Amino acid sequence: MKGSLLDKLKLYLISLLVFALIFSVVHVSASSSVQATTTISNKKLPSDDNDKDDLPNYDVLRTQLEDYIGTRPGKVSVYVKDFATGETLNLNSDQVYVEASTIKLPLVLYIYELAAQGKINLDAKLTYTPEYYAQGTGILQGEPFGGQYTIRELSRLSMEYSDNVAWKMLLDFMGQDKLTAYEKSLGAKATGGDNGLYITTPEDMGIYLERLLNFSEEKPEYGNEVLHYMANSIFSEGIPQDLPDDIVVAHKMGALNDKFHDVGIVFGNRPYIIAIFTDEAWEEVSLQTLADVSRIINDYQESVK
């Protein structure tokens, strides 16, 4: 990140606390039967007392991760970036994967960036028609056709519930070509589709997460809303699974067939960006791999003084 990461984090925390006080309980109705509550007020926010001169020795962490990953079936790739120093750890983080539902992160980020520029009205409504029906995760698939939902509601459902109907409606509204152009403008290298499936890398996801953090400083009323959605995901597997309950984790999971991914920002005593991608292993094993890798990284981050 440009400038002082800790200064940006401090500004982010101040704005997030204000946002949490104002919106400690946010109800966004997707219909009379579709509601969600957003609150992170009961979670510990990160401190800003890290010494920015402390440099994590990621050689040590790399060895720990490589030893663990060597015991796991399938492919595993990891990207980590320390807030305080900008130090990164890359384990096959340029490996191209099918994106699965992690694609919803850059899409919603793009929408909110345009909203902050006055180019999109988040309260504008889109209509749920049969062409947008999708199975899998989400709750709108059980709602009747003809319902109208704001772009803000659809964004929240895409992030908190990983709602596939909401995602299809938003993607059609925005356009895949424009989303791909936005991803490339941020520096992403693997974008667009491959045989009808969207692709990415853990490193590219790290780029989107870093942009979200910067955006939350530049336009906190918009960026923090996206972070709130991620912090209130209904999915507790993956990155947050084995972490202490008082650590805020803003994350977005993705799963498709034998592909299980999780990307996010962990706001512990030493905050960091994290992206973990897996492939070619069965669900139970892959989900445990995500949780174990996350725990190993967090244990290391918490140990650095």
Image: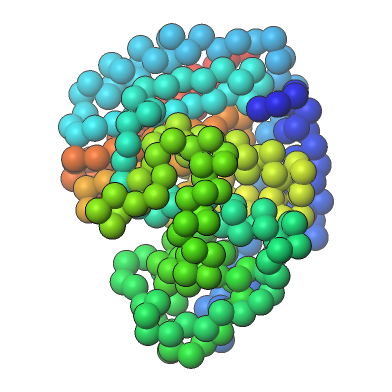
From what the image shows, is residue 174 above or below residue 224? Answer: below
Residue 45 image-quadrant placement: top right
**What residue is shown at x 45% (from left), y 25% (from top)?**
297
Residue 281 occupies quadrant: top left
- Residues 59 and 37: in front is 59
Quarter of the image where one finds residue 123: bottom right
Residue at the (77%, 43%) spot, across then down:
218
Query: How does the figure colour the protein chain or chains?
Result: rainbow
Seen at 32% across and 31% down, the residue is 95
Q: What residue sits 75% from the left and 41% below the top?
A: 217
Where's residue 77, x and y in %? 34, 30
For residue 52, side relative to residue 246 (left or right)? right
**The N terminus - image quarter:** top right
Q: Residue 232: horizontal and vertical position, in percent?
A: 56, 56
Residue 305 location (% of width, % of height):
63, 13
Task: Look at the picture and state if 90 lies above or below 280.
Answer: above
Q: How many marks?
A: 0
Is 116 on the left-hand or right-hand side of 211? right
